[in-house]
Amino acid sequence: MHDTDRRPRHILTFDLEEHFHASRFDSSMRRRNWLSFQSRAQASVARILELLALHSTNATFFSLGWLAEQHPSVIREISSAGHEIACLGYGHELVGAQTPQLFRTDIRRAKNILEDITGHPVVGFRAPSLSITAHTPWALQIVAEEGFLYDSSVLPIRHDLAGIPGASPWIHWQALDGIRLWEIPPSTMSLGGFRKAIGSGGYLRAFNYPILKSLLARIEALHEPIVVSLRTWEIDAAQPRMRGTALSEFRHYFNLEKTAGRLDRLLTDFQFGPVCEVVLEIREQVLSASVRAALHSDPRDSQQELPQLTTV
């Protein structure tokens, strides 16, 4: 078990979405029938929370607004356990499939839903399928304008759904019309001349664990935080099967039965926490804003809780 007196060095994140939200299986027909599909989110989250509690580890959950409306108790359970709730948008639309106004409406709606459920500010955003690309340069500006302190959507890779080749692979901030927005890119590494998203659930499932551990250890040796990004459905090998292209089915279902064991080993070998614990500048902004809000609140109102961040 980790030494709880030390601040976590690395970042663990989950995209909280149903198995039928996967972008590779998306279609207008499937969207119309979301409510008719079997929900697996509660069981997947319960298993993940059990693993995290076993290792005394907190994480960031990027939660879909649609799912939060259907299962608000799941969001409350995650938040009550001390994990950070962040935003995955509302309707799991790829950014490139939306206009700037539709994108703004989508993320604003999701942010409001999540804050209403948890009672805490939601300061982090990730686009579904990490789909902020070089073709949607306007998206980060909107994320900043909507009050998020950080984004975790930009991969410095070439990919059919995601990626901005040449973007920084490390945690950094940028000023967007005077608004500072932190970028928390999931971990990548150059392998065979191509940069790969080794911090993703796909590579956790694809690589033998000793190989993955050695690659992540290279990032740790650079004194940079590892950023791991998993989808909650990746821990559920018994999920109903969806039909798609052979490649889509392979990518989605490959080695799902190994995710839980490999996550357990990751939590043993590396010290993880949520974004708001690991990136101190973001933590300080959140706490300062919460203190200001508490000082200016009506003392007759019910007590306001500060965001649930582990004391460093």
Image (cartoon, rainbow, N blue to C red):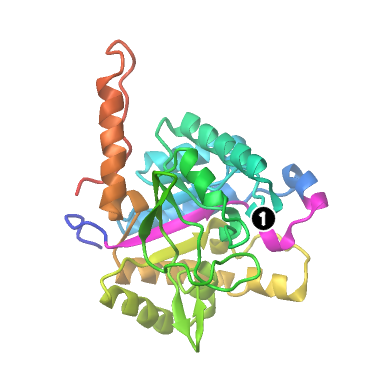
Residue situated furthest bottom in the rendering: 192
Residue 247 drawn above or below residue 307: below
Residue highlighted by disc 1: 96
Q: Residue at x 45, y 38 (%)?
A: 147
Residue that appears at 66% across and 41% down:
102
Q: How many marks?
A: 1
Q: Position of residue 142 (x, y in %)?
A: 53, 44
> Image quarter for residue 305?
top left
Query: What is the span of residues highlighted in magenta in the rendered image?
Result: 9-30
Of all residues, the one furthest to the front in this rendering is: 177
> In this image, 78 relative to 39: left or right?
left
Which residue is at a point 50% across and 78% down the rendered structure image?
195
Compared to residue 56, the image places residue 260 above or below, namely below
Asked if the stretch drawn in magenta spans residue 17, the answer is yes
Which residue is nearer to you in this view: 218 or 184?
184
Position in image of residue 177 (x %, y %):
44, 45
Q: Position of residue 62 (x, y in %)?
A: 49, 49
Q: Quadrant of residue 20?
A: bottom right
Is 106 displayed left or right of 50 in the figure? right
Q: Secondary structure at mark 1?
A: helix
The part of the image, by quadrant, that contains residue 212 is: bottom left
